[in-house]
Each structure stands twice: as C-alpha cells, then as structure tokens.
Image: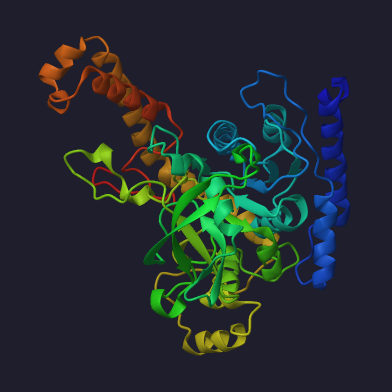
Amino acid sequence: HHIFIMHGPRMVWLKSILVLTCFLSSVGHGVHGETLTESQKEERRAEIASKAVQTPVLDIGDPNKREQFPEETPLVCLAFLSCCGRTNLLNHTLSGIIRHMEEDEPSGLRYEIAWVDNGSGEHLTNDIVGTYEIEHALPLPKNMGLAFGMNALISNLCTAPYILLLEEDWLYLDEVVAKQTQERKSAIARSLALLMTHPTALSGTKKIIGVQLRDTPNTIDGTWKKVDLQLPVDSHVDEDGDAPRETIEYGVSCMQLEKEGNVWGSFTNGASLYSRRALIGVGRMFGEPSDYFHDSYVESNYAFRVGIKQYCTAAISMEEKCTRNLLKPGDCNPSIRTSAFQHIGGGRGTRPRKRNEQKYCGDESWMFYGTEYYEQYKELLDAAKTTEPGTQCSATLPSIEEQLEYNKEFMEINAQLNAKHAEKEEEMRKGILKEVAIMRKYKLSELRSFIPTFKDYTDEQISNHIDKLEKSALSPHQLPGYWDKLGNMIKHKEL
C-alpha cells in the first residue's frame, strides 16, 4: 500500500517493478523440456530486460551522488549481479566503486551502472534504488539464475563498449588493505587504454579482450611488458589536444588446458573488464530458464568457450613487485600486486562448488557443452564413469529453476557451517577495537616503550598504525586468516 502514497520518480520506478512482476508471471520462466530456439530465448530475455528503469536522481550533497548522471555516452559499464538477499554486500561494492570512480580515477572517465538482482525481494532492492544513481536497474521478483543475469547485463542492459563485471561481492581495495598507488587509483582507465590498443598475446596468435583486476591469475605466462599509452579521459587532454602518456606494465593470461589442466585464464566473472563486443561474439552463457544445463558449470563453460576463441586477458601491475618481509608484513603483499578489487562476504556461497555438496550429479563434460568437443568428451566420461564413494546425488538433471531452489537449501546449510567461523572473525574485530581503545589512552612515547613493534616507529607511524587497525576492524574487507580469496573457510585447529 505504500506505493500509492509516493510521488515522482520513485513512484514511477515502483510501478515499473509491479509491471515487471506481472509480466514474469504471465510469461513464466520456461518449462523444463520446453523447446525454444536461440532467437526465442534472446527475445524472451530482451523483453524482460526492456523493463529495466533508471533510478531517481539524488540530491546534491548525497555521498553517493555522481557528478554526471545519467551518462549518455559511457565508455565503460559497471555491471552488478546480486542474488539471494546479498544486498548488504552490494551496498558496500556500489558505494566503494562510485567513490573510486568519482575521486580516484581521472575525471572525464565516462561510466554507466547496470544492475540485475535475482530475487532478493522488494524490501531489499528498494533500499538500493533509493541510495544509488543507476542507469539500468532490473530487480527481478524471482531468481532467474547466473546465466540469465549475466546475459542481460552483457547483451541487453549495458550500452558502453566495455564492461566491468563486479557481481555483488567485489570491493575496491581502499587504503585499509592496499597501497593507494597511482596505478591502482587509475586501474580502470589504464585497463581501458590497454584494451583500446587491441593488444595481442603469444606472438600475435591470440587477442587480449579483457583485464583481470583481481588477485594475480595463476595462468600469467611470466612475461611482463611495458607500454606507454594515453588514458581515454577528457580531462587529460592538454591545450594542444594531446593526452599525456602513462606507462602500463602488464602480463598475459590465456587458457592453457593442456598445461594447466583447467579452463581458466581467459575469463572470470569476478572483477574483470572486457570488450563487450567480444563477449557478445562468444555467445550467451548457458543456464537460462528453459536450458537443459547444469547450473554449477555456467561460468566454467563460458570460460572454455572464450578460451577456444583464442581470446586472453591481461593483468596490470598496480605496485612494485616485492617479496614479503615477515618482520614487516605490512610493507608488502605480493598477492595483490595486480588487484584493484577483492572478494568480500566470505562463507556465503550461493551455489555448491564441491562435488560432495551437489545434489545433482555433474561431470566435466558440461564445461564443453555447446562446442565441437562436447560429444567426444561426454562419450569418454560415460565410458569411464564410476560412482564415487560417499557421493549421493541424482543422475537426473532437473530444470534450472529446481536447481536454483536447491541452491537456497545449500545456502542455509552453508550459513550454518560457517556461522562459528564468522563469529570468530567478529570476535577478532571486537578485540581489535578494544586494543585500539586501550592504546589511545596512553601517550605515544609510552606505547613505544612497552610495545616492541613500535620501538623504532615515529609518532606519526604509531598514530597511523592505530588508525589502520581501527579501520580494518570496521572495514567490510575480510580479516586475514579467516577466508581465502574465494570466500572458502580457512580452518583452524580450535574450530
């Protein structure tokens, strides 16, 4: 009933969501076994995506206010896909990237924001709508799956030639967790500059279509190159009409199935910037409603298909290469040398990753589905297939919707398993804040005398150290030692 007492853009937006809800109810989500052509699937997705709306303009002075909104000629689309009530994470990632774009990246870097939410509910998505300026917002009343959301972002919502995929849980590495080097602060502009030169990899036989802005990919070939490029921003043009050149150091990551034994290297959903045209050329992700497909293999299948197109990604150096000094651990973190974003929300996985967690039996042949290699690999697996000890799963694959329903069950089980671990992390945060409060009761000279770490620190260094401790305890970034880079639990003996 609250809809009818609201006025202006917000009311228009809420009415649009009501229309979308009725629309989805009428067309359905696809029936398992239903025969639809590729063009019909595209038409269905495009029709649903056409219901996306622009969120209201924020008041001047709002911390999330963008200098230019809406952006009519964006160069890059910041693409978010949230799911399953995880808008608490989305709030962090959205506010973090908007602050980064407005304050860190060179002014004049034109960007738009696109967002799809998979069924978190109006009570959660309305808060996002009222807080951020988004050109293309599509909160869905039901979970349509990873493939549908990604396809809508890449093919139907974003209009910019380049797209930065952030899902809902990739947060910019601020000063709490990483050095704010010029390379990191201008990471998106530098990535765009590299991609716009259409670089090639491996002696020119493969094309670089993306830049991974997360932890260093394992598949970097070890050879790093330096190039001088102009950043694609209006503010960097001088009075002669020329933009200054910046040195960009990058490595190359390609899928090397024979060498690495996996399909990764050329594509990943998280914190990576791509040529949107190249991704559209690969085709849609499989796993939309009405597809007969295993939901656990949506990303890996797409990564393989990107790889066999002879596409690669790059990784850009954000800081000097270093070796960790155990005596001064804060001075160096080699794992984030190429990172501008980091995964948050540890322990809140939305789908089974391990085989013993899967209710519906899968095999690696799904990774090759839709390619010339599928039938051959499927035959080899079927011939060698044996039931793994301790594995209890159904060999019959249900519809995508039924698989997504099981994912809800998994999330509940996963949350229970991780609850104790999350409590330990929260206890550590509270403990850090208590230590900070105690240290602030003493003079800096006194702290230097009875805390060995501070023995050779200046007053400024001690103050900065205490401030950083406090910020790390309050930060949405994960504390070290509790979750790995994919959000999996790091087990401790006491747990």
- 312 or 479: which is nearer to us? 312
Name the image quarter holding residue 236: top right
**Left or right placement of residue 471 versus residue 212 in this view:** left
- Number of disc labels: 0
* Quadrant of the rendering where the N terminus is positioned: top right
Q: Is residue 255 left or right of residue 46?
A: left
Image point 82% across, 39% down: which residue?
A: 17
Left/right placement of residue 237 relative to residue 346 reads right
Q: Is 246 located above or below residue 182 in the figure?
A: below
Instruction: Please give the name of the residue rendered at 37% of the width and 66% of the height, measured from the top-left corner.
Output: 223
Relative to 397, say whether 85 is above or below. Answer: above
**Which residue is most to the front?**
240
Residue 221 horizontal/vertical position (percent) = 39, 68
In the rendered image, which quarter is residue 16 located in?
top right
Q: Position of residue 410 (x, y in %)?
A: 53, 53
Q: Going 53% across and 78% down the picture, which residue do you hit?
A: 205
- Above or below, comparing residue 375 to residue 66 in the picture: below
State which quarter of the image contains the C terminus: top left
Q: Could you tell me which residue is drawn at 79 percent across and 62 percent down?
A: 30
Q: Nearer the viewer, residue 36 or 330?
A: 330
Is residue 217 among the parts visible in the rendering? yes
Tell me where residue 44 appears, x and y as whole percent. Answer: 83, 60
The figure's colour scheme reads rainbow
Relative to 403, 72 lies left or right: right
Q: Nearer the viewer, residue 315 or 390?
A: 315
| Viewer-closest of 77 and 374 | 77
Please tell me whether residue 103 is drawn above or below residue 188 in the rendered image: above
Q: Is residue 283 visible?
A: no
Q: Position of residue 109 (x, y in %)?
A: 63, 41
Quarter location, residue 72: top right
